[in-house]
Amino acid sequence: MTNHLNELDRLYQIMIRLRDPETGCPWDVAQDFASIAPYTIEEAYEVADAIQIGDRTAIRDELGDLLLQVVFHARIAEEEGSFALEDVAKSISDKMVARHPHVFGDDDRPSVESQNGLWEDIKARERAQKGETKLLDGIARGLPPMLRALKLQKRAARVGFDWPEIDQVLDKMKEEAEELAVELASENKDQTRIQDEVGDLLFVAVNLARKAGVDPETALQNCNLKFENRFNYVEEQVVSKHKNFTDVSLDVMEGYWQDAKAYDRKQTSD
């Protein structure tokens, strides 16, 4: 534990030096909360990517990059006198203790299923203490849109605002697809309306994933990887047999794509 604290303090001292207006790094000194927020988001995604790959060294390194972001934000706050790194640690420690009365208090140890409900009840009380009284309050608008859609739907579902059956969600998806088709077929296309209809379709797709017990972010991430692998195969075939994409038709590329799909199915069945 001592070594952990020593290394964390070493990192914080490094950040203090980097942020020194006289002797620090000009780039680091120039940053503020808003300017480094995109890097914080990017580092979180890189942690998730390393986890998906399963590379433990990469996970360690990416977690370090993410920890640097926490230290960076905390140092900016300390300089302006609002809070410091220890306040960040105290805030999350207090929250974890309050959210686990079955571990740190006298409550009975709940099942995993009932714990999810208790967790939401505790978070609802925390939001109320912050003055967030509406059901959808506290769902950060800076979240990736798909993740925010999922959270909005889950929160609304807690009070019964939800399709009872997944078939109803499928029907809704068909309805939204038809509405999009109407807009796309219009002689006087309205790009704003098309955008709205695409958004409606994507929102229903997230709802469908939720009802099917699938995390939509993970599903899309896996789909992206599948597309990447299959298209890489198409590119390899085009380059080796035709030299350039301009030398092949879409039908030929589709044939290579189907070969890649067949290979994937064989690997899955094996």
Image (tube, rainbow, N blue to C red):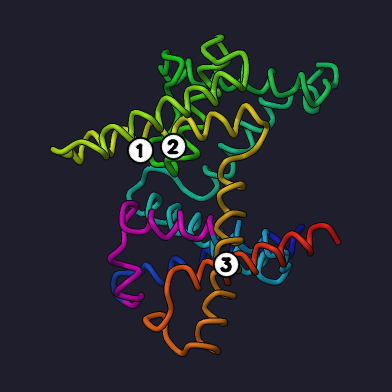
Viewer-proximal residue among 114 and 239: 239
> Residue 198 — which label?
1
Q: Magenta residues?
A: 23-45
Distance from label 3 to label 2 (Cα)? 25 Å
**Residue identified by numbered label 3:** 257
**Residue identified by numbered label 2:** 202
35 drawn magenta: yes
Q: Nearer the viewer, mark 3 or mark 2?
A: 3
Crowding near the residue tagged with mark 2, few <14, some 14–19, many ≥20 C-alpha atoms within 10 Å? some
| CB under 8 Å between discs 3 and 2 | no
Amino acid type at circle 3 is Trp
Viewer-proximal residue among 127 and 51: 51
Corner quadrant of residue 90: top right
Give percent across and percent down for residue 63. 61, 61
Name the residue: 54% across, 70% down. Answer: 231
In screen coordinates, is 255 left or right of 137?
right
Distance from label 2 to label 1 (Cα)? 6 Å
Name the residue: 58% across, 54% down. Answer: 223
207 drawn magenta: no
Where disc 2 sits, the SS reads helix
In screen coordinates, is 115 left or right of 18?
right
Screen quadrant of the C terminus: bottom right
